[in-house]
Image (cartoon, rainbow, N blue to C red):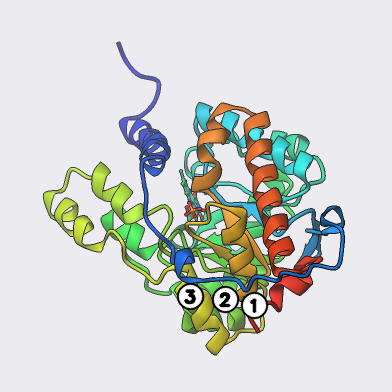
């Protein structure tokens, strides 16, 4: 029987599916165990008065956590994005979608269409595309069109050179990347967030992004999902398989990056992501200077299941964050941010 899909397209959709399966099997560490928040034995307020609300860019969030970019372009990812979008709306947090590349190259917008805005209600919604794709397409207006496609409030550009090198047919010609970053941000009508995918953005790269006009940086450090390990497991190339074992934990951890950024700060809000598993991890990121945090792996299993499961994951994180506030004697997020100073 003939398939309706060209072989390359099936492979790419299979790859997206395998990313989800393999991400769920990973266990790395992002350095949170090395950070201890100071215990405060004399809270002078009611636990129920703890306020986890915060502002990120122009967005009011019920808690300093957002759902990181993950999927789009497969039937399962449409279901996942619906669950995540409804949960983001219900819990008052922001949602980033997975790369919208597939909707440009293959006109496949499952899970990354206008429906998403309907499911997300008034939750802040962030579109996503790789810088490697922007370099190739050389289309100044691309970010605006991708934003329009889902009704986004901001756009995310992801930097993933170490994923591309291990990916079969990955994009390894990044010549012109800095100029492309400048041009893409300049022509985007919405705020642009620049993120990694789990290998981390160092202060030096953050500074380039700031100069290019980015509105925020997501450090996306190592210690959570490793796309080097994932691509290493998917490739048929023996050289890549072998090298991926060596590089699997490449990159500074999320905690290391936040500490480096404290020493060499940039004038941009910092999103901390990479390996966040609990509300205590979130509290530690905020105490280390992050404005908000972002989770992918920690909500993926729930997202595969139902909106209700995603809501429970977020509510549990919020509860643990409130306990971290209680234990440090902080009534709100602003106080928590000062606890290690
Ligand atoms: C299944 C899966 C797919 C992902 N796809 C994307 C993507 O399309 N674009 C992107 O910027 N990041 C993508 N990421 C990376 C995440 O946004 C995040 O930066 C990374 O997983 C680290 O967070 P974590 O440790 O909480 O998983 C993906 C992550 C997972 C688990």
User: What percent of the width, then of the height, locates residue 114?
Assistant: 71, 37
Per the image, the residue denoted by label 3 is 257
Q: Which mark is residue 182?
A: 2
SS class of the residue under badge 1?
Answer: loop
- Foreground: disc 2 or disc 3: 3
The mark nearer the N terminus, 2 or 3, is 2
In the displayed structure, 188 sits above or below 103; it is below
Q: Residues within 10 Å of mark 3 (few under 14, many from 20)?
A: many
Farthest residue in the front direction?
41
State the CA–CA distance, disc 2 to disc 3.
Answer: 23 Å
Tell me residue 127's x, y (percent).
Answer: 63, 52
Using the numbered discs, state the Cα–Cα distance from disc 1 to disc 2 in whole angstroms.
Answer: 7 Å
Give the side of residue 12 with respect to residue 106, left or right. left
| Image disc number at residue 213 | 1
In the shown orientation, is residue 219 left or right of residue 27?
A: right
Across and down, in percent, residue 77 comes to: 53, 33
The quadrant holding residue 81 is top right
Residue 81 to residue 332: above or below: above
Q: Secondary structure at mark 2?
A: helix
Instruction: Give the label on residue 79, or none.
Output: none
**Quadrant of the snapshot with the C terminus:** bottom right
Question: Can residue 141 be seen at all in this image of the molecule?
Answer: no
């Amino acid at each position: 029987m003939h398939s309706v899909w060209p072989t390359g397209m099936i492979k790419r959709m299979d790859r997206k599916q395998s990313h989800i399966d393999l991400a769920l099997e990973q266990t790395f560490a992002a350095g949170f165990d090395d950070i201890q928040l100071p215990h405060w034995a004399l809270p002078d307020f009611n636990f129920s008065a703890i306020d986890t609300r915060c502002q990120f860019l122009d967005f009011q969030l019920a808690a300093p956590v957002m759902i990181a970019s993950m999927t789009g372009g497969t039937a399962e990812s449409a279901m996942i994005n619906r669950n995540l979008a409804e949960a983001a709306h219900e819990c008052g947090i922001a949602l980033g979608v997975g790369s919208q590349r597939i909707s440009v190259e293959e006109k496949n917008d499952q899970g990354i269409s206008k429906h998403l805005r309907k499911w997300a209600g008034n939750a802040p919604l962030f579109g996503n595309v790789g810088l490697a794709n922007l370099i190739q397409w050389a289309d100044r207006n691309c970010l605006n069109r991708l934003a329009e496609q889902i009704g986004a409030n901001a756009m995310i550009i992801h930097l993933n050179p170490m994923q591309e090198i291990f990916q079969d047919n990955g994009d390894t010609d990044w010549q012109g990347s800095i100029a492309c970053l400048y041009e893409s941000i300049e022509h985007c009508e919405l705020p642009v967030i620049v993120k990694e995918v789990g290998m981390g953005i160092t202060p030096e790269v953050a500074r380039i992004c700031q100069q290019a006009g980015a509105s925020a940086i997501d450090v996306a450090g190592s210690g959570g999902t490793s796309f080097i390990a994932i691509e290493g497991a998917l490739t048929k190339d023996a050289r890549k398989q072998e090298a991926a074992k060596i590089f699997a934990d490449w990159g500074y951890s999320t905690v290391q990056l936040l500490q480096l950024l404290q020493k060499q700060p940039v004038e941009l809000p910092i999103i901390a992501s990479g390996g966040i598993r609990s509300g205590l991890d979130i509290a530690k990121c905020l105490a280390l200077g992050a404005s908000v945090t972002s989770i992918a792996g920690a909500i993926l299993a729930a997202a595969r299941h139902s909106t209700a499961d995603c809501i429970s994951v977020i509510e549990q994180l919020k509860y643990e964050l409130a306990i971290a506030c209680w234990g440090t004697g902080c009534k709100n997020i602003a106080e928590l941010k000062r606890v290690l100073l």
